[in-house]
Image (spheres, helix red, strand yellow):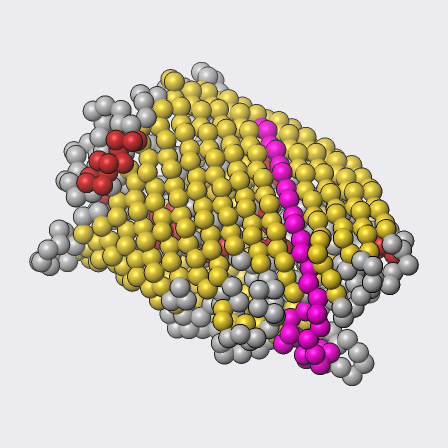
């Protein structure tokens, strides 16, 4: 089921409607019958047809059908996300086979792997193999808020995407497209309540301001108690709270020209996943001093996109700016873990403030939709300033801890690139695609460190200043063949590249040693697949076989006993298959499913600082098998009193994640699990009341795992991790106008 309650059911086109007046009228509009020219009514009538909607994507910086793109693209629509209560990007990506969301002890270290490609253990905030684009503005997973408020769709582009999406897309790209202002009045309000003090309030309004200007405003506030209980006071560790807002203006002075302005801000309190000892206990427990952990992350984004259609091509100019401010304080030592490691709870704390400012400017020329030859070309300028400040940190257990100090570290990146891609028909059935991007990149770092008075290090102050430059070529070559009007076959080779850089946690310079830059990583990617849509447009099926050969991907060699942090490089290979499909067998029923098999392994062992990272070890956190299955049903319920044309909506979704190794050493594995979610709603007119259950069968599973070696000979090691949430149920209401 695609829940379309957010669509307008009352369209007022007779004159431009100022939003101030629209807000008042909208409160009553939901109860009125729809006008004949209402596009939502037309869409509702279209839903009565047992056919699939066409899926349009911007996977190549221009609007085209997903079935025409010569590589794998998985799409989760905003409507699907809402109906399945996928409130964050993390939730959406976990529903995509072949995508692994790696939390690694917190959102500040969040990274993504596609098809097993990505850092073995993230080295820095810039060490990302999958770039996230929010309305064209690139951000790394660690510095991008994962809220998907009022999203039109999320596109997962698999395989290297350096040709059109640039840096840090060694494994692929995630393209978040938000909903745009409309020329008619529409909006919705939604509210939810659930277990563990879970709550959500959300609202959107969109409509015209003048003949040429329209606006959209979206707001959301949500929260829930932490899944972990603090063993020291028996209360939830903290309360997770998020506030998100975004406003957009669209100016269309002519049919050929459009200016789209967008501004958004998200504030997240206590969202980080923190580690605790496995097994977690019942309920899952952590032991740190009450109030010892606080976390606040604020992200602001601003974009301006100007497009103009000339007779022969379209010009697009995109400018973007993002500002991130992340502050957190946390206990260094978790009590349950260190009771097992050393027999008592040490005392230590660190506070960190991370800041980031990024600027992106891109100018593109491209073919117009529907032309026989697809092409796009452009230039891109990117600048990033990132800093980390450690303050008010102390460690009474290990005073020589290099973080028992005050320090600042600044990172700066400048990138320029030129790019282009073209698809040319070869006869009536074949199409050849080729694309190249040449990138120049410069990075620098500057660090200053001052030991605390009781830190025994004979070096009292230290500084590290370095820079590096790189230039590289990325691209792809693809051949597609229309076997029949319903079946497209394709094969693609792509070259991916992820630049080297500087270790965020490097502390060698505090002992007079060098913190060497980590190497660039490269990938050669091969994919062949098919895209099928039945003649009656009831069934769509996509499949792909892939092989990736990665050289010099990154691993953070972190010693939890001494807090020394170094980098190592390992080669990996990944191969596998993916199959995704959507089927509408009869009116009212819809089934979507996906399955992925990924065999990702380290292809060169090394006697590095981490030890036992052997050849043929599996890449951590990548299951061999994963899959999703979702069944939707809509049923009219005539004859119910006091309800106008009631409809019952039911959606049952299951996500399966297979067993996967927790760390590069393959010390232990995280168990396989299935997570079943249910949503049942009763809709009357433009209002729906619904019940929801996440993890209906109350399965227990891990989001993360890691092994800490014994601190002393014959001592005990410890397995740590972060637990997933058990069963949660609640109610909700959605009202559209």
Q: Residue farthest to the front? A: 453
Instruction: Report the front residue among 235 and 3.
Output: 235
Q: Is residue 223 left or right of residue 559?
A: left
At a point 32% along the width and 26% down the height, the residue shown is 209
- Quarter of the picture containing the C terminus is top left
User: Which region of the structure is painted magenta?
Assistant: 333-362
At a point 66% along the width and 34% down the height, the residue shown is 383
Q: Quadrant of residue 458?
A: bottom right
| Residue 134 highlighted magenta (yes or no) | no
Q: Quadrant of residue 66?
A: top left
Up the image or down, 735 lies above or below 565; here it is above
Residue 205 image point, x, y percent: 32, 38
Residue 551 image point, x, y percent: 73, 51
Instruction: Report the front residue among 707 and 386.
Output: 386
Up the image or down, 428 lies above or below 670; here it is above
Residue 671 in view in this figure: no
At a point 41% along the width and 67% down the height, the residue shown is 196
Q: Residue farthest to the top? A: 311
């Amino acid at each position: 089921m695609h829940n379309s309650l957010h669509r307008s059911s009352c369209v007022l086109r007779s004159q431009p409607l100022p939003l101030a007046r629209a807000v008042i009228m909208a409160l009553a509009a939901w109860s009125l019958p729809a006008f004949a020219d209402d596009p939502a009514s037309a869409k509702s009538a279209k839903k009565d047809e047992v056919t699939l909607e066409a899926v349009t994507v911007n996977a190549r910086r221009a609007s085209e059908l997903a079935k025409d793109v010569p590589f794998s693209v998985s799409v989760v629509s905003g409507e699907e996300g809402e109906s399945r209560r996928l409130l964050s990007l993390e939730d959406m990506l976990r529903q995509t086979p072949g995508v692994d969301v790696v939390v690694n002890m917190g959102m500040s270290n969040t990274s993504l792997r596609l098809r097993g490609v990505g850092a073995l253990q993230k080295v820095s905030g810039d060490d990302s193999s999958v770039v996230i684009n929010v309305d064209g503005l690139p951000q790394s997973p660690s510095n991008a808020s994962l809220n998907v408020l009022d999203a039109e769709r999320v596109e997962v582009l698999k395989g290297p995407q350096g040709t059109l999406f640039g840096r840090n897309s060694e494994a692929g790209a995630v393209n978040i497209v938000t909903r745009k202002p409309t020329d008619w009045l529409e909006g919705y309000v939604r509210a939810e309540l659930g277990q563990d003090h879970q709550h959500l309030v959300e609202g959107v309004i969109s409509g015209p301001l003048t003949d040429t200007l329209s606006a959209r405003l979206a707001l959301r506030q949500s929260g829930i108690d932490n899944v972990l209980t603090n063993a020291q006071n028996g209360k939830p560790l903290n309360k997770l709270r998020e506030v998100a807002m975004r406003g957009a203006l669209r100016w269309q002075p002519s049919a050929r020209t459009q200016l789209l302005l967008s501004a958004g801000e998200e504030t997240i309190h206590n969202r980080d996943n923190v580690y605790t000892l496995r097994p977690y206990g019942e309920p899952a427990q952590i032991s740190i001093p009450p109030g010892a952990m606080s976390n606040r992350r604020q992200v602001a984004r601003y974009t301006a996109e100007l497009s103009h259609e000339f007779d022969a091509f379209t010009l697009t100019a995109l400018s973007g700016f993002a500002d991130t401010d992340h502050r957190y304080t946390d206990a260094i030592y978790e009590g349950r873990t260190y009771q097992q490691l050393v027999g008592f709870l040490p005392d230590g704390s660190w506070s960190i403030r991370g800041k980031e400012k990024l600027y992106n400017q891109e100018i593109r020329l491209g073919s117009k939709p529907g032309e026989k030859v697809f092409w796009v070309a452009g230039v891109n300028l990117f600048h990033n300033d990132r800093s980390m400040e450690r303050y008010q940190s102390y460690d009474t257990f290990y005073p020589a801890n290099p973080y028992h100090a005050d320090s600042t570290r600044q990172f700066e990146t400048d990138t320029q690139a030129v790019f282009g891609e073209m698809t040319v028909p070869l006869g009536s059935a074949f199409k050849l695609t080729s694309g190249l991007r040449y990138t120049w990149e410069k990075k620098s770092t500057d660090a200053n460190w001052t030991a605390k008075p009781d830190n025994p290090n004979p070096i009292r102050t230290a500084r590290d200043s370095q820079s590096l430059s790189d230039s590289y070529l990325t691209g792809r070559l693809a051949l597609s063949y229309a076997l029949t009007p319903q079946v497209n076959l394709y094969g693609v080779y792509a070259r991916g590249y992820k630049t080297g850089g500087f270790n965020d946690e490097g502390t060698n310079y505090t002992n007079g040693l060098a913190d060497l830059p980590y190497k660039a990583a490269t990938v050669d990617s091969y994919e062949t697949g098919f895209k099928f849509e039945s003649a009656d447009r009831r069934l769509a099926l996509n499949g792909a076989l892939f092989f990736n050969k990665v050289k010099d991907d990154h691993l953070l060699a972190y010693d939890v006993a001494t807090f020394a942090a170094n980098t190592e490089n390992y080669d990996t290979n990944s191969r596998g298959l993916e199959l995704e499909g959507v089927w509408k067998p009869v009116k009212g029923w819809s089934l979507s499913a996906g399955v992925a098999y990924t065999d990702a392994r380290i292809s060169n062992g090394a006697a590095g600082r981490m030890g036992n990272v052997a050849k043929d070890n599996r890449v951590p956190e990548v299951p061999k098998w994963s899959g999703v299955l979702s069944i939707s049903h809509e049923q009219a319920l005539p004859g119910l009193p006091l309800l106008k044309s009631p409809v019952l909506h039911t959606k049952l979704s299951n996500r399966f994640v297979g067993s996967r190794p927790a760390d590069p050493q393959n010390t232990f594995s995280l168990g396989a699990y299935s997570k079943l979610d249910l949503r049942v709603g009763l809709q009357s007119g433009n209002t729906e009341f619904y019940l929801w259950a996440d993890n209906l069968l109350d399965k227990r599973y891990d989001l993360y795992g890691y092994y800490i070696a014994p601190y002393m000979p014959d001592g005990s090691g410890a397995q740590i991790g972060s637990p997933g949430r058990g069963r949660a149920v609640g109610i909700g209401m959605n009202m559209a106008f």
